[in-house]
Every structure is written in structure tokens, then in C-alpha cells.
Amino acid sequence: MRFRQISLVWAAVLTLTGSAVLPAYGMTGAYETETGNSYTEQYQGEGSSPVSMEVSYGYEENAKSGRYVPVSVTLNSQSEVSFTGTLRITAMESDYDIYEYDYPVSLNPSGSLEESLDIPVGRADVLYVKLLDSQGRELLRKRLKMNVSLDTAELFVGVLSDNPQELDYMEGVGVNYSSVRIKTFEMDTEKMPDNAIGLDLLDVLVITDYDTRNLTGDQVSSVWEWVKGGGTLLIGTGARADDTLYAFRSSLLEEPYAPPAQKAVDMGVEYAVNGPGDSFMNLVCTNVTLSGGTEVLSNDEFPVLTSVVKGKGSVGVAAYDFIDIAEFCRVQRSYVDKLFTAFLGENRLNNLSSYLYSGNSSQYWSVQNILNTGDTEKLPNLSIYAVVILGYLVIAGPGLYLFLKRREQRTFYRMAVVGVSLTFTAVVYLMGGKTRFKDTFFNYATILDTTEDYVDEYTSINIRTPYNKAYTISLDPSYNLLPITRSNTYEGTPVPKFTGNEDYKVRVFYGEDETKISVQNASAFDPKYYSLRKRTPNTDKKGLAGDITLFEGKVYGTITNEYPFPVERVGILMYGKLVAIDALEPGQTMELDGFPVVNYPVNSPFLVSARVTGSYQYPKADIEDPAYMLALSRTNILSFYLDRFSSFYNQEARVVAFGRDKTENRFLARGDYETYGMSMFTSTIDVKTTRDGKVSRSALMKPPTAVNGQYYADSNAIYGIDPVSLEYSLGNDLEVEELFFENPSEEFLNSEGLYFTNVFKGSIHFYNHDTGNYDVMNPDKKVYHGRELTPYLSPGNTLTVKYVCDSTSENNWYVTLPMLSVTGRNK
């Protein structure tokens, strides 16, 4: 070891003097190679290695904190004998603990091996890739100094195209007032992963001028899973619409589209030089109608960019091919800013900016909340303990003394007290048998999201031990594992030096039959959180299916429980509306016609969850009541799901339910451990919005544009200190017949708990296009007919509404607005 340290120092000295150092055969050495803004340091142990190793990471050696980072390793045998060893990747998590990820490897004589590994990295700054032999001795090491932006948040955009170089105009463009900078990466069919984890590093995937028939079924499935988890897919069409849409059309298109044709596209009046006509470009366009889609950018006659929400992510389809606007965008680069800001929305872009500083901590706090509800059977009965302790005090004190005094045996008092104390100690020990943890134990929360083809499982676990000792547990190897840690930057803790020689805190070994997690230097009851993901085929066609129509605030159709077991506390959530069903037996179909519909506040997932699970019925917390604790556990996991995996405004209904019995945990490979947790079952069902030739839909599916004031689109709330004007898009394809203003139902208002809804109170004004002024409306009026709206609707069917909060109201800093919906006929 001392020889190695001297060699490293000597290498550093020569490097500073401009000399190049290469390790001689059979000697210890270290050297650095630079690649762009990153560099690697390779170390070779004692003697010559029988295997050579090359390593690359990320997309074009770029990475982000708190994501899975792809690491590609190539091993080449330099020996005439077989090699068996371990590939170890060492990383420092955001809480500064050292995590090691071990992968067994073997090479035939003179053979080679390529491994593509997705490594969860908390602080994507430095990684160490090490090769160990079968005895655990280190043969090779490579230090990866990653290219991670610490100053400006980056929008990682993958480009899948036959001519990706034509999209270079996107590179480096500042988006959302330059708070986020675009960084593009060329993808190809071979680079496209067949699992969603491989896309985790991307924020946006652009597919244009490309035939998606080249993608395999697994690759297409991975894209959909990635989108559902929060990814953004942007598709260009133009002349090659049939090619780019082929793999996704069945899940996107509402109806067939007309053949591509040349049209005049208005890029925006801001790009006109000599007159309005200068802003038009003649482009080959395809007019695509997405199921449940909303217009993001449009001309007077057709939509230029349409988007639709899928899970927590979204899909956008442009009428043109992004290759065709390359020349224009190279001159007018701000159009790229306009395009991405309109499509992604300021809220998502702001989240990317904040993520630069907060990392993965938000997930840590969310997971902690759902895993903190423990097993009530472990709670001691305090009244019985109080009786036992009081009895001990009475017996060991005056009772024993008086008894011995009466028998004139006071000399035995001390010995008797010792005996009584030992007896009561044994009693207390035996009483605590059921409340005592004897070994490592788990809390878990599982979300099983079913579709017609797949079951996606999202499980969060908390592993703890009751003793200050190391432990090892075995998990099912089919799960993808991600540690969940919180950032220590909040405490101002300085980042410790990371040399790769530190002792590990957590080691993960990926075997064929098990994934082993080994934790050392563990403190008693110190929590360790992990996220587990798995996708399996839905061969048994389980789930919650149905045929649902939502029209003018009423629900029609049916829902069926296709699970082989009963479910209860079933909730159907869509467009800010909720239908609650007590229970469904296996195979039971429930008619939804006539079911009461509850309007819920989209900015209060906890209140919505409490309404579904029934925990709102308990006036106060009672941890000794098993029914209350069950309802609270269900509320926490549903609130987590709505916050992390679901969007409130999409074209699908989210159906959630719970089993009556605790579902057996699925993640353990072996071992008899105490586990406590809960499983929630979810499905998505397409919602019809047409009835009797009319269309009824939410006016909030496309977020309103803030003309002035502060508006929070994700929660439909405003900063009400100042007047706020919003422009609502009611749909250029609709002849508006009625407009509805709906507030959350009374049960969500004036809550006495921590969570409450502060509903708008004040005056409402409509902008009059005939007079150019705002007209005051009756604040109690909830329905407007088409003829009343004539002076207030623009040619593009937009309505501008100004909200002025009552100056006497409290908490005007965060005010929930009414939810608007519109009914009409297609033009």
C-alpha cells in the first residue's frame, strides 16, 4: 500500500511538470486521460492484470444527480485461462454514504465481455469502477470524473432521427428565461434501451424523420413506461408521419388523419420583419387529432403542436417535421425556447431548475411519510404497564416491608426486594415479547399499476435492524433497485473527500438468484429507504376495467373488478371529479349511473386521498384504533401515488382500490423477516366525453395562460394579493354551448385539520372583445350559455377571466380557483 501511495504521488508530480506517465508492465501505477470536461484515472494493481478494462458513462459522458446513469464496461481477456471476478462500482450518495454495486463477471480465455449497467447515483460527480478477482483482490480501477452542470439546470434531450445532425439548432438553447439549458444527445436504434431505467437520464425524447417500425416491442414498451413515470416524448410528423407515429398511434390517435399536405404555418408575429406575412413558412404538415389532446401551439385553421398527458409525463405531436424548420431555427433560436416552454410548461421547467439544488430529497420525504405508519400490534398496552409498575412500587416498597415486619423477618428485606425486582423484570420482559423486534424488519408500500398488457410494480421499502450490527438481506433479482437518500446540503455539511478507498456503508450484489443488500456500521433502527421497480406481463388480465363517460359533471357506464379477490375503498378520479365505491367482489360489475360525483381540489392530494380511504371520517387521530391506522396508511400511500405518479388533468380515469387482507410482500428472495406494509391497486380507463352528439370536457386540460398575476397551473391556484387574469382555451374545434364554473365540494372546505382548501372569494370579470373592457360577472353564477359568451370569446375560442380576491379574505397568498368545463358541438 505504501508503494502504491508513493507511485501516485510520483505520478502527480510528473503530471504537474507536463510529463506523461504510463505504468510499466507488472508495476503499480496511475494515470489520467481527459475527455471533454471529464477525465478518468486508471489504476492497475500489483502485477499485470489478466483483463483490460474500458469504461464510458452517461450520454456522451454527461450525467445528472439523482438519476440512473448508464455505465458501459468492456472487458478483454489477456490470458490463456478463464477469468472469474467481480465488477464493482463505488458511488457516494447524496447523504454522503458510500454505496457499492457488485456484478459477477466471467471471461473465457482470450474472450471479451460488454456490460451495460444502470447505476443509481445520488451525487453524480465521481464514480469508481473496479475489477476484482475471485479472491476479492483489486486488479484494475478507473475513476470517472463526471461532467455534471452545477451552475445551470440542463434539459437532457435525446434525438432519435435518421438525420440527427439537422437538429443541432436545439443544442445550448436557453429555455424559460434561460433558467434551463438544452443539451442534446444523438440516439439510434441500437442505443435505445429495452427498459425504462435506461431512459432515466433523459428529460425529453424527440423522434422525428425516423421509422419507428425499427424499434422492438420492448423498446416501445420502455418508452411508454418512461413517459408514465414523468418522461416527455415529442414526435415530429410532416411528410413521414406514417413512419414516426407507427409504433405509438394505437395509444395516441383518436381518428385517422389526412395525408400530409403543404400548409402555411405561422411561426409567430415576433419573427416578422417587414410585415405579418414574414412569419409564415410553407411546410409539409399532418393534422393529427390526439385522444384527449390539447392544443399547445396552433394556427387559425389547424393545431401546430398538440399534447396529451400520460401518467406523470406527456406526449406532444407536431404537425411538421423538426428537420424542416432547422434553417429557420438556426436564425431564430428563440423559437426553440418558445416551443419547449409552451410544451413542457413553466412548472415542469421550474422543477428542473430546483432539482439542480435539491436533488432527490423530495422523494425521500415522500417515501418517509408512507413508510412511517407502523404495525399497531407492536404498540405496548400502556395501561397494563402502568398497573404492573404501580404494583411493583407497592409490593417492593411498603408492602414487602410491612409483610416482613409483621413476621419479624426484616433482615430479609434487601434479599426479598432483589427477588421481587427480578420477578417483575421477567414479567415486563415477557409482556414485551410481541412488541420486540428480534431481527431485521421491513416496512413497505406497494403500488400495482395494471394495464391490459403489463403490471408495473412500484415498491418502497424501509429496512431497519434493532441492534447496532451489520446485516444482509436478499431481494428478488427481477427488481430494479434505487436507494432513496436525502441531501446533506441542507445542514451545510461539507462534502467529504471521496477517494474510492473509503469503507462502504451499503453494498448491493446482483446475483442470478438474488440481489443481496449488505449494510455495515448500522445503528439500531436507522432507516434505509429503497425504491423497487418491476414490469411483468399481465397474462391473467387482472385489473379494474370499465366503460366510463363523464358528461356535464355526471358519470355514466360501468366498472368491473377483474382481480380474483375483493377490493374496497375504490376511487375513480378524473378531471377533478371523484366517484367513491365501498367495495367490489371478484368479477363484480357496478353500474355508475346515478353515483354521486364529488368535486375535489386538485391542489390537495391528501384531502382527496382521505375522502377515498375514509380517514376523513375520524375527527381526531387515535393510534390505538386499528381501523383509523389502516385508513391513515391507505391515505398516505394514495396521496404519495397522486403526487408522484398521476396527473389530475388527463384523458384517463385513475381507478384506485385496496385489498381487504394484507398482500404478501413480493420483494424478498429468501429469509423469514417481519414485514408490515400495504398494497394499492391502480388502473387507468379511457374516459368518453361525448353524449348525444355533444362534447363535454374540462377547460383546464390545457393550462390557462397568465395574462397578468401569479397562477399555479398544477394546482389551479393563484397568488391572490393582486388581481390575476387568465386566458382559458376552450378549444378551437368546438361550438361552445355552455360554460360551467365549479368549486370543490363543501366537504373539502373549512377543514379543521392541517390540510384545507382556501376557495376563491371575490369578483370575476370577463374581457369583452367588443368594448375592450372587463365586464363584472355575478360571482354566484355557475353556468353561462353560448349566447351570453358571444362578446367574450375570441375567434380562437379563448376566454380571458380576471379574478379579484375579496380584500377582507384571509390567506390570499394561495387561493383555489373554480374549475371550468365546457359543453358544445364539434365544428
Image (cartoon, rainbow, N blue to C red):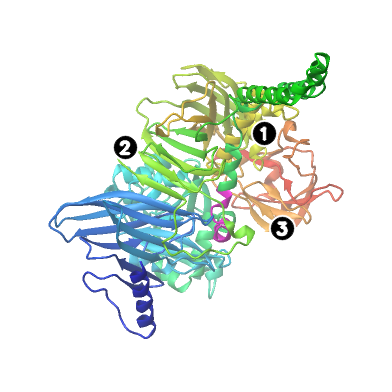
Q: Residue furthest bottom?
A: 17
At mark 2, the secondary structure is loop
- Most foreground residue, 132 or 46: 46
User: Label 1 is placed on what type of residue?
Assistant: Asn
Q: Residue furthest right?
A: 808
Residue at 37 percent across and 30 percent down: it is: 538
Mark 1 or mark 3, earlier in chain: 1
User: Label 2 is placed on what type of residue?
Assistant: Asp
At mark 1, the secondary structure is strand
Read off the residue under disc 3: 709
Q: Is residue 344 above or below residue 271?
A: above
Residue at 44 percent across and 59 percent down: it is: 502
User: Label 3 is placed on what type of residue?
Assistant: Gly
Q: Residues within 10 Å of mark 1 (few under 14, many from 20)?
A: many
Spatial CA distance of label 3 from label 2 is: 57 Å
**CB of mark 1 within 8 Å of CB of mark 3?**
no
Q: Position of residue 781 (x, y in %)?
A: 77, 38
Q: Is residue 471 found inside the magenta-colored segment of the image?
A: no
Specify the label residue 513 is tagged with: 2
Q: Position of residue 119 (x, y in %)?
A: 40, 53
Read off the residue under disc 1: 599
